[in-house]
Amino acid sequence: MTTMRMVGALAVLALVWLGAGELRFTAAAPQGSSRAFLIVRSDLGIHYGNTEEECPGGFEMTVEDGYLATKTPAERERLLRPENAKEYASGWKNDFITGPGGENVCNNPKSFMSDPRHPAYRGVKGSVAYGLNLDGTKDGAATASTCGHQKFSGVGGEAGVDNQLYRAVGCAKNVRGLGAPANPVRIDPFLVEVTGIDDPKNDDRVEVGIYSTDDTPLQGSDGRALPNQTLGVTRNPRWRATVAGRIANGQLTTDRLEVVRLHHVLPTWGPLGTDYDFEFHGARLRLAFGTDGTLAGVLAAYRPIENIFTVGRCCKGTASTANTDCASEHKTLALFADGYPDPETGTCTMISSASNITGIPVFVTREPQVSRR
């Protein structure tokens, strides 16, 4: 057998180890090679640039800030005296976040849409953001599938970037915090598989699979997922999607994918939260293969405004302990939403977003695995 034929044979068969201890071979892409990655880092596409330029008014108001803003200077001074601490705490942790029907700002933020005590955020004033041009326009003018909005310039200088989610929450204290987190994970780990690679630098046709996994990735002693392990593609078709892509100068881009759903567990919801998912509509990916075997880039998409911070809106404690005004947050998402207008009202129901993602190399299999969940 010639060297080229041997290489081709090895590209067709990948040896994987199943949890039961049995060795099997699983077929790879029929043409070209394939590479698979476990996405271990994801974020909300927050650009941590000059805070004074991006957030000239400072952080958005927290629940406590909002409560104090409703008081006169004299009343604020009185409430902040030590002897009035109990009254003060009850005021912002109970009365201020509770509606007339007993609902609170995080359990049912939509019920506070007309409550002036919980105003929308000011939003990011900067001009640079992570993301891609999702609507195809240069100026953000309204189209049949979008609402008019202001565009960003990309971090790399690209024109016409859409990331209204960043504009909405990029100055919120609970999101921006003290800067970029060391190990952000906003989406449960998922798999990206690129098949049909003839040339990793330039290839006009590859296929990109985006899958959840039913397995819990193995971790090292540092708590990080281990590379080169084998993970099974989820057996639930709801959490699997494929799309055509291409590689140019080492950069992988995909066509538009109408919807991607990725499995997410809501621990605060108990049994009801075991089969939740995050949704990404009109999604596109721009990724690059690293010399160290990793994958990094952006997942840009429109996200339903009800589907972004559901975990954070689980309960009253989000407002009273985490100090997040979910009512103001929801108003802001609705205000800046720029995609998928309601056919009857014309109001946009989704918001453009960008998730910066990083993946480590793994092997994937369609064979049943011993569940690690």
Image (cartoon, rainbow, N blue to C red):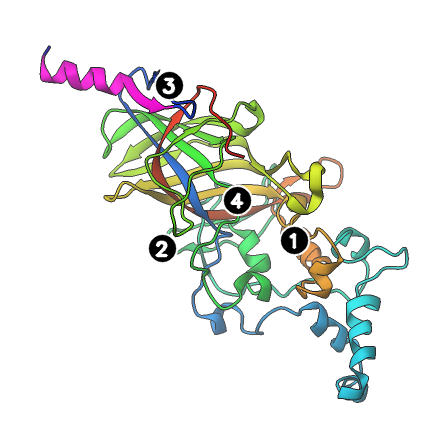
* Three-letter residue code for mark 4: Ile
Q: Please give the label number shown on residue 187.
A: 4
**Crowd class of label 4 (few under 14; some 14 to 19; many from 20; radius 10 Å):** many
At a point 62% along the width and 46% down the height, the residue shown is 147
Q: CA distance from mark 3 to mark 4?
A: 31 Å
Magenta part of the chain: 2-17
Residue designated by label 1: 312
* Three-letter residue code for mark 2: Gly
| Residue that protrudes farthest toward the front in the picture | 21
**Element at label 1:** loop
Residue designated by label 3: 22
Q: Are marks 4 and 1 in contact (CB under 8 Å)?
A: no
On the image, the x and y values in percent for residue 271 come to 70, 37
At a point 31% along the width and 15% down the height, the residue shown is 30
Nearer the N terminus, badge 4 or badge 1? 4
Q: CA distance from mark 3 to mark 2?
A: 50 Å
Whether residue 12 appears in magenta in the rendering, the answer is: yes
Nearer the N terminus, badge 3 or badge 2? 3
